[in-house]
Amino acid sequence: MSKRNCALLCAALFLAGAGSVNAIEYGEVVQKDGKWTFKNTEDPVFKLMRDTGWITNERYFQVLERTGQNWIEPADALLNRRRQIEWNRYLKTGLHLPDWIDLGLEQRTRFESYDHPWRSSQAIGNGRTDAQILMRSRLRFELGGNGPLRFFFEGQDARAFLNGSPGAFRDNTTVNEFDILQVFGSLTIKNVMGTGLRTDFHFGRMTMDVGNRRLIGRNDFRNTTNSFDGFDWQISQDKTWRLRAFILEPVIRDEERLDTQSNKSIFWGTYFESKHFPWFQIDAYYLGLNDRHVANAANHRTYSTFGGRLFKDPKPGKPEYEIETTWQIGTRGVTDHFAYLQHLGLGYMFNLPWTPRVIFQYDYASGDRQPGDSQDGSFDTLFGSRNFEYTRTSIWGPFSRTNLISPGWRVIVTPTPGLTLEVKHRVWYLAQSKDFFGSSGLRDPTGNAGTSLGQDVELRALWAINANLDFEAGYDHWFKGSYFDSPVILAQMPTGGNKDSDYFYASVRVRI
């Protein structure tokens, strides 16, 4: 391959016309002036490969046939959301790899900055602005294609730069250098004993998106990602229903060394999804956790988490809703544990230009009423994601699903198929005034600080050139509440931590 062809390929990737973030569905192939072309939009990079002789016409048509509805399903397709793992495989095509080999690269670079830190762990920083550059790179490799037996590997390298100043935020949610994110074998039987049912087995290290990801999620915005070692089994009937069961050891992330797991931390559960009625879809689940890998016995967790979710997906001209109720029982250390999470969402997508979508949301996550007594009431979100409905996470993310009350609304519009704009407003309160504020380390055992955490307004823009290249930027202003003016809380924060905080980020993601 010549340097000129390489340059042309890169230029086409970055300058391709705007299109949907989803895979393009191609039209019929037609012959014009002795050349085969498509009726509808062609992928410019694949077209460039063909026009420069990098790939043959035959290979070109094979690649396009495998795009969109005819994609070759990867081994983790039932473990993770499709939009996180599907893009045009330019690298695989350019290397002339056969269908039974999959190869993909993903790289995201993001600049982030926020002022007036509030976490107790950042007190040494004296309130200085925390600005960082976070980079996350992933490599996917798979053997097996559409066969029943497949082997899958995904490596990830997550790093943060400009984080060496005193008080800069850094932990294993931002840094996890060169590690194994997924490595497993899978078995798929698409017609079990002629019943039309499909069953899938996965054994090894894997990431998981379950339900709406409030309790188990493959982290997207966060720089590092939750993964698990163990066994996952699923059985389903088309897209009508699915039942899954798993038993896993959560992977313990280390910032610089290889991640490990512990047999003193076991996570198991079952999850059932029913889509028999599009207007009344149902999830029901039970999740068990026995986590004793930490030395401090007071932090040992033995929980049973169970609940259900009713929802209707958004569609133009139709109302939508989501109701989820989750309950936890068990022990934390030697203390009895009883906690719960309630979520309500109501929305409507208008059948108008830009398809505006309006959503009203309310969350209640229980807190601990009285510290030091025999009952712990702080809800534990387990391995869930927050970014999609609270605030951006990473070095920001002040709010989490514990000891929290939050009503709010958001409006989402799509001026073009590849451009999404969003504005969000939420009000934040502690559910219990004497419990911790999320993971900030802040707590007033007397409760005199009150419960008002303030409110935030967030603006976000996502421009997806195509499935291989997207840009994202956002701004969040947090109007802090009276809780942060309490002398007890002021003494635990960095200087200026009670002042309003502004957060800004801008990122670019490339996938080949």
Image (spheres, rainbow, N blue to C red):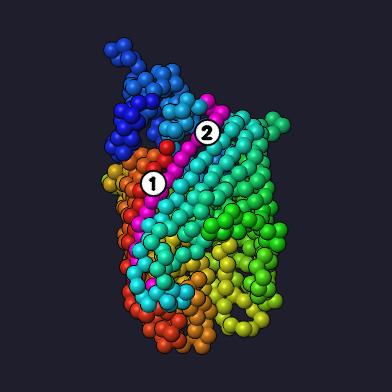
Residue 63 coordinates in the image, percent (x, y): 45, 26
Residue density around tag 1, few if under 14, some if 14–19, many if 20 or more, within 10 Å: some
Q: Which of 459 and 124 is in front in this view?
A: 124
In the rendered image of this protein, does residue 222 appear above or below residue 500?
A: above
Residue 363 coordinates in the image, percent (x, y): 48, 67
Report if residue 104 lies within the magenta region: yes
At 57% from the left and 69% from the top, the residue drawn is 379
User: Circle 1 sits on which residue?
Assistant: 509
Is residue 371 visible to us here? Answer: yes
Question: Which region shows up in magenta?
Answer: 98-118
Residue 332 coordinates in the image, percent (x, y): 66, 72
Outermost residue on the top side: it is 34
User: Circle 2 sits on which residue?
Assistant: 102
Q: Quadrant of residue 29?
A: top left
Q: Distance between the residues labelled 1 and 2?
A: 20 Å
At 42% from the left and 52% from the top, the residue drawn is 135
- Mark 1: amino acid: Arg
At 65% from the left and 56% from the top, the residue drawn is 261
Q: Identify the main secondary structure in magenta.
A: strand
Label annotation for residue 294: none
Q: Which of 289 and 264 is in front in this view?
A: 264
Helix, strand or loop under label 2: strand
Asked whether disc 1 touches disc 2, contact meaning CB atoms under 8 Å apart, the reply is no
Left or right of 415? Residue 311 is right
